[in-house]
Image (cartoon, helix red, strand yellow):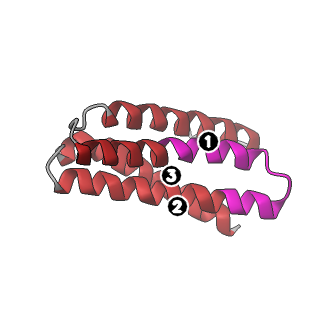
Amino acid sequence: MTKVLDNIEFGRELEKRTREFAVRIIRLSRTLPNTPEGRVIRTQITKSGTSIGANYREANRARSKADFRNKMHICEGEASQTQYWLEVIVKVKWLTWAKVKWEYEECGELLGIFTTAATN
């Protein structure tokens, strides 16, 4: 039987999910090469990947529907950027697809959630 979450429970679960995602992105970023290029990408993916959860937490404390939607759009953008950096990391062969698959797919799911929430 599938458990149906109310909005408050869903919000709490999504905050936990985005926090876990941030931790996984930080751990992934530590594996990138310690070269000038690697450090740039490490900084970029760490910023975008951890910003998703921080902005989602702010969205949950929004002062108005417009403020909520705006913050959700920020979450969307950060998730999209994180996916981009994961694609770059695989393309330059710093990590394999298998090593980033979970993060990429989770980021895609988060992006879908934020896109839906921002338009409602």
Q: Amino acid at mark 1?
A: Ala
Q: Residues within 10 Å of mark 1 (few under 14, many from 20)?
A: some
Q: Looking at this view, name the residue that lies furthest to the left.
A: 93
Residue at the disc numbered 3: 110
- Which picture quadrant has residue 76? bottom right
> Mark 3 touching mark 1, by CB under 8 A?
no
Residue at the disc numbered 1: 54
| Earlier-in-chain disc, 2 versus 3 | 2
Q: Amino acid at mark 3?
A: Leu
Residues shaded magenta: 50-71
Q: Distance between the Cα atoms at labels 3 and 1? A: 13 Å
Name the one closer to the observer, 108 or 88.
88
* Vertical order, 1 against 110 (above or below): above
Q: Is residue 65 magenta?
A: yes
Q: Is residue 46 magenta?
A: no
Element type where label 3 sits in the image:
helix
